[in-house]
Image (cartoon, rainbow, N blue to C red):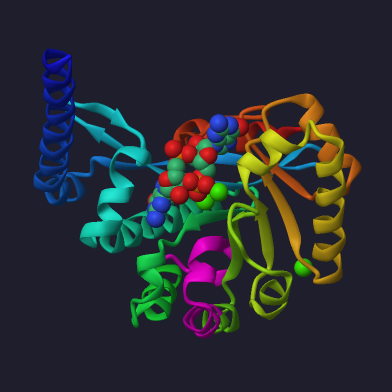
Amino acid sequence: IKGQYGKYFATYDDALRGKLLRQQAITDNMESALAGGQFEVYLQPKYRIADERLAGAEALVRWNHPEWGLQLPGEFIPLFEKNGFITKLDQYIWDRACAILRDWDDRGLPPISISVNVSRADIYNADLADILTHTVEKYGLPPSRLHLEITESAYTENPSQIILTVSRLRELGFIIEMDDFGSGYSSLNMLNEMPIDVLKLDMKFIQNETAKPQSQGALRFIMALARWMHLDVVAEGVETRSQLERLREIGCDYVQGYYFAKPMPCGEFQELLKKQEEI
Ligand code: C2E
Ligand code: CA
Ligand code: CA
Ligand code: CA
């Protein structure tokens, strides 16, 4: 038994050491990766349910490391949120997203919008509104082309700060989406006070719950509430036709999910956009 415990702790230590080494490697590499253009914007299509046409995209970062290969955000975003680097990376992603929109406009492609993620750390940056405004102006875009996704948990963490910051961004013309709605504890009361334009239903909510009849009731209730508040609703993580049909039935506006498309490099997305234009 003693030997077994020893072995257990040894593997535990090894795992921990491995994790710390990996975090150190990420920290050592992040600045040069940003400067060297290793962070890349992938775009995941968003479709309007009514006509199943492409209606927008979410920008999701990928790290294309020369030795480690393509890294998903789950590998590095949590660390960047802790060490503060997320603020820099997000600004870079917003800039890239606007550059992409500019390029599409110049090619005469349909003027869809791109949703970008705004980390909770960005909310506390006093220059946030200036930075975002400067970014859209740099590319000659109206702020409404950039949708800002802010996770529900950032709202519950510090409601008064969020209300101030987000009201300002909305006045400037940015579209505000509450991300991961249904994953946390936002009360209906709070939702009513929040300056938002779009509700993005959390993926787990769709995937675990659409199968159960009582959850169809909850979804109907959320849709009724959203309509009353004049909010658009986007369902995330839609993987099957039956999930899509249930969402259509209750009047959900948009879907994003593997059923239609995974996040893809921006060149591929552009082909989709072109194809749709020809129809
Ligand atoms: P999120 O904002 O909730 O983004 C949705 C995630 O769900 C993406 O994962 C997307 O690839 C994935 N997804 C989309 N459709 C489906 C589906 O049908 N099934 C399943 N199983 N998954 C689906 P991804 O790209 O790995 O991003 C993970 C998270 O990392 C994001 O969650 C977001 O919180 C964060 N993130 C990604 N890019 C950025 C960024 O540029 N800035 C910040 N601050 N966070 C980012
Ligand atoms: Ca998001
Ligand atoms: Ca989400
Ligand atoms: Ca509306």
Residue 52 is covered by the magenta coloring: no
Q: In the visual, does 29 lie left or right of 268?
A: left
Q: Which stretch appears magenta?
A: 139-166
Q: Quadrant of residue 62?
A: top left
Q: In the visual, does 64 lie left or right of 21?
A: right
For the point 30% across and 29% down, the residue is 70
Q: Quadrant of residue 231?
A: bottom right
- Rendered location of residue 259, percent (x, y): 67, 27
For the point 52% across and 84% down, the residue is 160
Q: In the visual, does 192 lie left or right of 153?
A: right
Q: Assign the C terminus to one quadrant of the image.
A: top right
- Rendered location of residue 214, percent (x, y): 85, 42
Relative to 144, say whether 219 is above or below: above
Relative to 164, say whether 74 is above or below: above
Q: Assign the N terminus to one quadrant of the image.
A: top left
- Rendered location of residue 147, percent (x, y): 56, 62
The residue lying furthest to the front in this view is: 1
